[in-house]
Image: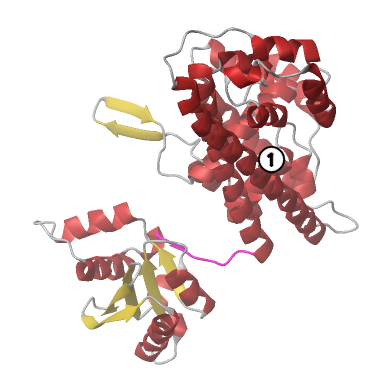
């Protein structure tokens, strides 16, 4: 077994500027400790020192770290060393288990990582490099999620500012204020006083620029000239500049978000061609046949859960995706809680998939309605729906069969009968 073949165990407590290393032998005796700078030269020296300590036999060395990513972890993995990710909570509890006083410092943290690796190696997961396209998908989808959050933040800010001094303009905006037409109006007429002097010709030119048909020039003029609530002198002029800044920031974030969506689809297509063969459509094509998943959801699924999808690991997807509950039972008490220790990005992707499936897949819609009818909240019903969808996905990948909604409906009728 792998745990019997390791003779040297290293724990690394890494920070921005340095990395503290503790080395233990198979009997748990400390055989070395060093501090390295967390720059390129220092990480190269760290790798060379670890190789020297195991006399070049890298198969006999295990390295414990708290983060599965970052420059320290990537340098060690790229050099061929066996690196294991140990959750900070696990390291904290192991340190408290070995010290009644719960003393803590960086050197003790490095020792706790090495000691935990020596005694409980099978409990930790080895860090394996993912294919470059999968890494790119993961970073692009995380960037897209960040930009989406910023988009909502600036849209909410813009809505509050307009509500404070120019509420009539909100009547012309789309639901989420992601409307270039509204931004153009604010650039031309940022205050109600200036908007009251807008001409029909200028408004028609703006409507023609964006090819809008849902509003007429008369509607726009009526909104711009509508009398708002009474404001104290100087309020409108004071709020005009923050409103323009919010509109410009919202425009910039929307443009960056749209620019981030294009390479996601490109990389996903490249991954699909890489996995497909003339006889087999590939995992990506099979996953895209699911209702409600879409290219962005598929990119999140493969970017965040690549290892578990490739291994057809249902429990891994359920636990890392946050839909598997946590049961706490002791004596006569038993409670079930939401799993919070999970991959938040994968959890959000699975939630969006459930929401899309509940709208576009009849079987998923029926199951979601049943859960809601039993009194579950929307979040809890989405997790229950994901628990129903993940086995379907893995069965499709295992049998190499695209999704067939009619087949699921026939199966549901047989179960009801």
> What is the secondary structure assignment of the residue under circle 1?
helix
Q: Residue, x 53% and y 39% (percent of image)?
A: 150
**Residue at 50% in and 18% down:** 165
Residue nearer the viewer, 378 or 137: 137
Name the residue at the right extreme: 278
For label 1, the residue is 393
Left or right: 116 as drawn, with respect to 417: left
Residue 128 located within the stretch drawn in magenta: yes
User: Which color scheme did the rendering employ for the protein?
Assistant: secondary structure
Outermost left residue: 101
- Indicate the position of residue 97 as horizontal and vertical percent values: 18, 56
Q: Is residue 52 above or below residue 384?
A: below
Tell which of 352 and 396 is nearer to you: 352
Residue 345 at x, y percent in the picture: 53, 44
- The quadrant holding residue 110 is bottom left
- Above or below — where is 96 with respect to 177? below
118 w.r.t. 358: above or below: below
Q: Left or right: 77 with respect to 23?
A: right
Magenta: main secondary structure equals: loop
Quarter in which the N terminus is drawn: bottom left
Does the image show residue 394?
Answer: no
Question: Which residue is rendered at x = 34% and y = 80% of the image?
Answer: 8
Magenta residue check for 237: no
Left or right of 324, for residue 299: right
Q: Position of residue 87 (x, y in %)?
A: 36, 56
* Nearer the observer, 274 or 371: 274
Disc 1 packing (10 Å; few <14; some 14–19; many ≥20): many
Q: Is residue 240 above or below residue 75?
A: above
In x, y percent, where is residue 175?
64, 21
Q: Quadrant of residue 289?
A: top right
Specify the segment rendered in magenta. Answer: 124-131
How many callouts does the rendering have?
Answer: 1
């Amino acid at each position: 077994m792998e745990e019997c073949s390791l003779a040297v165990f290293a724990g690394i407590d890494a920070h921005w500027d340095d990395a503290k290393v503790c080395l233990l032998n198979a009997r748990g005796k400390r055989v070395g400790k060093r501090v390295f700078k967390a720059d390129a030269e220092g990480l190269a020296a760290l790798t060379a020192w670890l190789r020297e300590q195991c006399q070049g036999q890298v198969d006999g060395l295990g390295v414990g770290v708290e983060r599965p990513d970052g420059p320290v972890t990537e340098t060690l993995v790229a050099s061929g060393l066996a690196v294991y990710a140990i959750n900070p909570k696990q390291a904290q509890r192991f340190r408290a288990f070995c010290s009644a006083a719960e003393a803590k410092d960086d050197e003790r943290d490095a020792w706790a990582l090495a000691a935990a690796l020596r005694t409980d190696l099978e409990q930790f997961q080895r860090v394996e490099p993912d294919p470059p396209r999968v890494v790119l998908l993961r970073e692009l989808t995380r960037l897209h999620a960040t930009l989406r959050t910023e988009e909502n933040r600036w849209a909410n800010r813009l809505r509050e500012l307009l509500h404070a001094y120019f509420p009539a303009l909100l009547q012309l905006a789309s639901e989420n204020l992601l409307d270039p037409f509204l931004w153009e109006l604010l650039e031309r007429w940022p205050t109600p006083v200036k908007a009251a002097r807008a001409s029909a010709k200028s408004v028609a030119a703006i409507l023609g620029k964006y090819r809008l048909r849902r509003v007429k020039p008369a509607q726009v003029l009526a909104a711009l000239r509508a009398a708002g609530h009474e404001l104290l002198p100087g309020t409108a002029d004071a709020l005009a500049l923050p409103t323009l800044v919010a509109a410009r920031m919202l425009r910039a974030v929307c443009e960056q978000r749209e620019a981030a969506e294009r390479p996601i689809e490109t990389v996903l297509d490249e991954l699909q061609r890489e996995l497909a063969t003339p006889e087999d459509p590939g995992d990506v094509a099979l996953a895209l046949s699911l209702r409600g998943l879409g290219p962005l959801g598929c990119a999140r699924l493969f970017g965040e859960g690549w290892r578990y999808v490739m291994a057809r690991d249902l429990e891994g997807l359920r636990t890392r995706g946050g839909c598997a509950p946590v049961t706490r039972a002791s004596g006569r008490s038993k409670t079930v809680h939401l799993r919070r220790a999970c991959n938040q990005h994968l959890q959000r992707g699975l939630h969006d998939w459930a929401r899309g499936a509940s709208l576009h897949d009849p079987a998923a819609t029926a199951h979601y309605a049943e859960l809601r009818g039993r009194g579950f909240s929307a979040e809890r019903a989405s997790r229950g729906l994901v628990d129903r969808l993940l086995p379907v996905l893995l069965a499709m990948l295992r049998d190499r069969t695209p999704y067939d909604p009619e087949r699921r409906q026939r199966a549901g009728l047989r179960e009801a009968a």
